[in-house]
Image: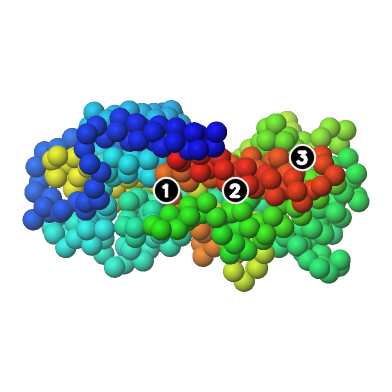
């Protein structure tokens, strides 16, 4: 039966790739920058994204107009395609008939899927090009522009196993720790900086803090974690423990190891003691627990969630505009505070191959403009709640004033952005390959299963959960 499942999966995988690319043989090929760079010709490019019509598209359109002052012959059409997965699904269909857009929002696993059809432009030659941009400058990025990108965001574009650059960071988010600052201050509780401690009096470990809160409020679940998958993957990164690999010749799925079983078992003990819950176990985002102020209802005092969702982690204000408690925001706990690791999320953009090389060059110029523009990055961040991808935004007067107002009330989004910028050296991304999204799904499901399952033999249950997750990853990839 297992051999049958494997054979069937191989057949299905072949059919999927054949359908995606027709009869073409999939070969890796760099985009060749045309001699002379952008020649000023009139071209139209299309950009797929998920921006809202009321808040973000007006910002984009303002800067398209600014772009056209520099490049009047490059016409940019943009289209919102639902959510991120909707963008992926739409493009997957269009690639099969060579109808894909020029530019699109993307996540790494989307690009890995598109690359089954060799559809995404390798950006290295464009980034390094000294050819003309058609406006008196160079097509590629300057040394200063490259250095301006937050490193963890920029290097995400190279996480595909072959060393090439496929994406540029557009706007980013991460996970942060939201905590009830009013409660913490009143009860003399320190904000946790690390997960575990062998010292029972280590007041800055999350282990100590959740137990202390439980002593003070037996009805509370001290900590809520929104993403089980992020939790697992981040712990792997913090421990420097294997998770996945995109390198040729290595096993893709490497998370079945003793170190990972150890931290999962520790968190199971926390959940069994009522110290932590997750989005899937709770049934909704754990911000719902965090903003609850009725002590007779399920509630928490900490929440690990997206930095872009800061306003959802703030309780409702009363009729006078006062909040029932002040929200504090900090970096998530670490295994080693001197070697911090925090996940990089939020959309990047990729450029698709086209028969007309000038379309590709024009697409690159638009991507370069948006990702290196201090004004656009600042305004888009303030409108979206996402974090800018370049460091120089902090010197923008408007954005600096935005950050200066950061607090745990009306300006909680600014506080979230400020924390994200302060931990710029901590960001990481996982390898991307065909199957990386399956690994993410499986470790999230594994985490949930281990936390809740009742059994007399915990170690055996955990071992089986890990083995089953590996089997599912290998089956789905084929």
Q: What residue is pinned by disc 3?
A: 452
Kindly report which numbered mark, 1 or 2, lies closer to the viewer in this rendering: 1
The image quadrant that residue 136 belongs to is bottom left
Left or right of 201: which side holds 112? left
Q: CA distance from mark 3 to mark 1?
A: 30 Å
Q: Count up the numbered dots.
A: 3
> Is residue 66 something one can see in this rendering?
no
| Residue 306 position in % (x across, y down) | 59, 45
**2 and 3 marks in contact (CB < 8 Å):** no
Left or right of 152: which side holds 259? right
| Residue 17 position in % (x across, y down) | 33, 36
Left or right of 153: which side holds 410? right
Which residue is located at x 75 percent, y 37 percent? 289
Q: What residue is pinned by disc 1?
A: 433
Give the mark nearest the N terminus, 2 or 3: 2
Q: What residue is pinned by disc 2?
A: 230
Q: CA distance from mark 2 to mark 3?
A: 18 Å
Query: Could you tell me which secondary element the residue under label 1 belongs to?
Result: loop
Which residue is located at x 32 percent, y 41 percent? 116
| Residue 469 position in % (x across, y down) | 60, 43
Could you tell me which quadrant the N terminus lies in? top right
Kindly report which numbered mark, 2 or 3, lies closer to the viewer in this rendering: 3
Near mark 3 (Cα within 10 A), the count class, few <14, some 14-19 or many ≥20, is some
Residue 45 vertical placement versus 242 (above, below): above
Which residue is located at x 23 percent, y 62 percent? 128
Give the mark nearest the N terminus, 1 or 2: 2
The image quadrant that residue 419 belongs to is bottom right
Give the mark nearest the N terminus, 3 or 1: 1
Query: Could you tell me which secondary element the residue under label 3 belongs to?
Result: helix
| Residue 177 position in % (x across, y down) | 67, 52
Left or right of 270: which side holds 101? left
């Amino acid at each position: 039966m297992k051999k049958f499942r494997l054979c069937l999966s191989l057949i299905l995988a072949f059919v999927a790739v054949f359908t995606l690319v027709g009869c073409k043989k999939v070969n890796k090929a760099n985009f060749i920058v045309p001699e002379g760079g952008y020649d000023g010709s009139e071209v139209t490019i299309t950009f797929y994204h998920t921006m809202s019509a009321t808040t973000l598209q007006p910002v984009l359109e303002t800067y398209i107009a600014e772009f056209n002052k520099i490049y009047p012959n490059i016409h940019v059409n943009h289209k919102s395609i639902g959510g991120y997965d909707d963008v992926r699904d739409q493009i997957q269909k269009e690639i099969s008939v060579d109808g894909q857009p020029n530019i699109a929002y993307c996540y790494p696993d989307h690009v890995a899927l598109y690359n089954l059809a060799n559809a995404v432009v390798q950006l290295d030659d464009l980034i390094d090009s000294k050819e003309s941009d058609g406006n008196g400058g160079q097509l590629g990025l300057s040394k200063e522009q490259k250095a301006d990108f937050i490193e963890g965001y920029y290097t995400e574009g190279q996480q595909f196993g072959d060393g090439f650059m496929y994406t540029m960071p557009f706007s980013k988010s991460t996970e942060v720790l939201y905590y009830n600052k009013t409660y913490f201050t009143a009860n003399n509780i320190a904000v946790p900086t690390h997960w575990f401690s062998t010292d029972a009096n280590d007041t800055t470990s999350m282990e100590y803090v959740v137990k202390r809160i439980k002593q003070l409020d037996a009805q509370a679940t001290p900590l809520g974690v929104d993403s089980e998958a992020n939790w697992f993957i981040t712990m792997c990164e913090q421990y420097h423990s294997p998770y996945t690999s995109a390198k040729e010749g290595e096993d893709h799925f490497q998370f079945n190891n003793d170190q990972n079983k150890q931290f999962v078992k520790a968190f199971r003990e926390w959940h069994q003691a009522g110290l932590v819950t997750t989005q899937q176990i709770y049934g909704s985002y754990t911000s719902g627990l965090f903003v609850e102020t009725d002590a007779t209802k399920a509630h928490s005092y900490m929440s690990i969630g997206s930095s872009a969702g800061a306003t959802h982690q703030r309780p409702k204000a009363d009729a006078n505009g006062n909040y029932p408690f002040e929200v504090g925001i900090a970096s998530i706990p670490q295994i080693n505070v001197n070697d911090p690791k925090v996940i990089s999320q939020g959309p990047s953009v990729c450029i698709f191959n086209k028969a007309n090389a000038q379309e590709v060059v024009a697409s690159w110029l638009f991507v370069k403009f948006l990702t290196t523009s201090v004004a656009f990055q600042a305004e888009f961040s303030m409108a979206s709640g996402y974090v800018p991808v370049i460091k120089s935004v902090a010197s923008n007067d408007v954005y600096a004033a935005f950050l200066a107002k950061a607090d745990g009330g009306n300006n909680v989004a600014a506080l979230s952005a400020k924390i994200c910028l302060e931990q710029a050296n901590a960001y990481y991304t996982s390898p991307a390959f065909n199957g990386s999204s399956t690994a993410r799904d499986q470790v999230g499901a594994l985490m949930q299963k281990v936390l809740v399952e009742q059994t007399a033999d915990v170690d055996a249950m955990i071992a089986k959960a890990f083995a089953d997750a590996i089997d599912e990853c290998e089956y789905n990839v084929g």
